[in-house]
């Protein structure tokens, strides 16, 4: 299925391309009555932002009906297609929810009103506590209470199971294989529902915009992650792993995920849900060295300590860090926030301290290596002599200007060439416009909004990455989505949404049927899920993901 990505429209063209306003939304003189009507709400996107938004709406309004539309045939978004296969604990929510408990404890429950995510304080939303916003009523604790010694049941709850319970609600429906902006327009959804929430995430990657980027052997990290995680549009990526050296541009968690998958012994991956095609390619891989390159210095890396520790301890590998990159860093990190300070201390120890006997022996026997290159910015992908593929990358040497958040890398005029046969760009994801009727800021890569209300489009909301940009972890998205849901319900209560019944999915399903589109229900997904689990059992894997949408439809009898 072709990826949804409308190309940019200038601001001045939106008024020309916008579809006629919905009569029922724009021209209604009456307001919605929560007591008289069932609010019909549509969520576009079934990743964490979409499901957390739906969960909040269903929990906090006893009559609301929520329909979730998804362009893939299967649900769960980045939980399925973005989480590394060797990180199943993220999918089951252990680290994310445990981190949520710790953060909430430190921010809210020491008897003070410290601002939390998005400036929120415990009393900032009527009838909502930090626990209900984060854990949706998971624990009852008051100011000054001691944090639990063990995470409560909800903190260990399987994220996908949580989403599954939401989708199985008799007030929620899932419609996969429906691409909003192609199969149905946002305006048609607005005509069918009282409110529409855009939660479709960031479906594209930031381009390098350098010569040679188009050469074979150059991929976005997003596509590479999609390839080994079974994203249908990336199933035929077929990266050539016959080279000795790979370069990853970017120093965030995705970059470390990709480096770790490239260097992990394949037998450590064979019991995960990595695709069989990717596992086969990694078994044949000749990649021995991975360089992870950043424009700025150690203090500005975007990865977190968990991912760094995994790289340092990765079996069969050794780190390559230049102690010169860390000169003077010890004094500069003293005032850093604790998470950043701990990360820098680990980097410093790894780069400058002599390892113990056991660790030294492990590193000496390692057949693979990875390293961090700082103060380097990509300038050009260098072609092979015949010009048919990537053979290296030219890096501009940089230095830092400015302080704090304003620190930026500027070229010194020096360059260096780094030979490699594989270049992976991991400089960020970006959202795309979904429909010409929806405003979009191409510079920020978001739908312009105020607290989740789309600017100048009544009844239209957004949550997740398309609301705030592709930043944060799953708990960040959870909080953000709950806040959008809360804002929508506040508008509903205040009478800001239009009155009168809306046909909801009945109208949309008729439109899709007339256009030859077959929506996939959640019960259909559960059949596909059972098939994946069955296929995985033969090789001891949790599942073998289905990759071909046409095969999925055939299995469902379409």
Image: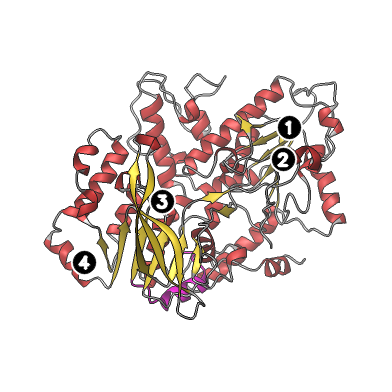
Disc 4 versus disc 3: nearer the observer: 3
Disc sitting over residue 457 in the figure: 1
The residue that disc 4 covers is 363
**Sequence-first disc among 1 and 3:** 3
Q: CA distance from mark 1 to mark 3?
A: 35 Å
Q: Residue at x 22, y 35 (%)?
A: 334
At mark 4, the secondary structure is helix
Q: Residue at x 64, y 63 (%)?
A: 528
Q: CA distance from mark 2 to mark 4?
A: 54 Å
Residue range in magenta is 271-288
**Sequence-first disc among 1 and 4:** 4
At mark 3, the secondary structure is loop
Q: Position of residue 411 (x, y in %)?
A: 37, 51
Q: Position of residue 156 (x, y in %)?
A: 44, 44
Q: CA distance from mark 3 to mark 2?
A: 30 Å
Q: CA distance from mark 4 to mark 3?
A: 24 Å
Q: Position of residue 486 (x, y in %)?
A: 61, 28
The residue that disc 3 covers is 252
Q: Position of residue 492 (x, y in %)?
A: 71, 25
**Sequence-first disc among 2 and 4:** 4
Disc sitting over residue 438 in the figure: 2
Q: Answer whether labels 3 and 2 touch (C-beta < 8 Å).
A: no
114 drawn magenta: no
In the picture, measured across the screen, residue 368 lies left or right of residue 516, that is: left
Rendering quarter of residue 339: top left
Crowding around mark 3 (Cα neighbors within 10 Å: few <14, some 14 to 19, many 20+) is some
At mark 1, the secondary structure is loop
Disc 1 versus disc 4: nearer the observer: 1
């Amino acid at each position: 299925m072709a990826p949804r990505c409308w190309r940019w429209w200038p601001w001045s063209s939106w008024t020309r391309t916008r579809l006629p306003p919905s009569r029922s939304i724009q021209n209604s003189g009456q307001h919605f009555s929560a007591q008289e009507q069932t609010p019909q709400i549509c969520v576009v996107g079934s990743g964490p932002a979409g499901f957390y938004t739906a969960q909040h709406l269903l929990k906090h309004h006893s009559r609301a009906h929520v329909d979730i539309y998804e362009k893939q045939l299967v649900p769960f978004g980045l939980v399925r297609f973005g989480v590394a296969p060797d990180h199943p604990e993220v999918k089951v929510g252990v680290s994310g929810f445990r981190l949520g408990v710790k953060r909430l404890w430190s921010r809210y429950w020491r008897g003070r009103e410290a601002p939390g995510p998005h400036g929120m304080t415990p009393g900032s939303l009527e009838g909502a506590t930090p626990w209900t916003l984060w854990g949706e009523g998971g624990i009852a604790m008051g100011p000054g209470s001691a944090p639990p010694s063990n995470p409560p049941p909800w903190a260990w709850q399987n994220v996908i199971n949580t989403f599954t319970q939401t989708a199985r609600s008799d007030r929620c429906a899932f419609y996969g294989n429906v691409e909003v902006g192609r199969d149905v327009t946002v305006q048609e959804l607005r005509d069918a529902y009282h409110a529409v929430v855009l939660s479709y995430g960031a479906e594209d990657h930031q381009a390098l915009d350098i010569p040679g980027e188009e050469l074979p052997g150059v991929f976005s990290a997003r596509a590479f992650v999609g390839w080994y995680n079974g994203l249908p549009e990336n199933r035929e990526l077929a990266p050539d792993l016959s080279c000795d050296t790979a370069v990853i541009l970017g120093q965030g968690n995705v970059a470390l995920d990709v480096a770790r998958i490239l260097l992990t012994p394949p037998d450590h991956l064979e019991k995960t849900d990595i695709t069989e095609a990717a596992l086969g390619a990694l078994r044949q891989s000749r990649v021995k060295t991975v360089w992870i390159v950043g424009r700025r210095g150690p203090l500005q890396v975007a990865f977190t300590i968990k991912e760094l520790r995994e790289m340092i301890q990765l079996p069969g590998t050794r780190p390559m860090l230049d102690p010169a990159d860390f000169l003077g860093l010890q004094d500069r990190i003293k005032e850093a926030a604790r998470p950043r300070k701990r990360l820098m201390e680990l980097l410093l120890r790894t780069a400058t301290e002599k390892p113990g006997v056991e660790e030294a022996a492990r590193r000496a026997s390692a057949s693979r290596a990875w390293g961090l290159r700082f103060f380097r910015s990509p300038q050009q992908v260098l072609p092979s002599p015949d010009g048919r593929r990537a053979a290296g990358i030219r890096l501009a040497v940089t230095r830092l200007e400015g302080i704090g958040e304003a620190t930026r890398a500027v070229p010194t005029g020096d360059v260096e060439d780094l030979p490699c046969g594989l270049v992976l760009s991991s400089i960020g994801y970006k959202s795309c416009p979904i429909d010409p009727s929806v405003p979009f800021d191409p510079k920020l890569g978001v739908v312009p909004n105020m607290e989740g209300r789309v600017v100048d489009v009544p009844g239209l909301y957004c949550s997740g990455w398309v609301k705030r940009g592709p930043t944060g972890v799953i708990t960040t998205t959870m909080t953000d989505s709950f806040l959008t849901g809360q804002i929508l319900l506040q508008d509903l209560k205040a009478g800001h949404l239009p009155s009168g019944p809306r046909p909801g999915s009945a109208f949309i399903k008729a439109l899709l049927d007339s256009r030859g589109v077959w929506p996939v229900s959640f019960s259909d997904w559960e059949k596909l899920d059972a098939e994946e689990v069955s296929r995985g059992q033969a090789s001891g894997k949790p599942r073998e993901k289905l990759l071909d949408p046409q095969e999925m439809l055939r299995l469902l009898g379409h």
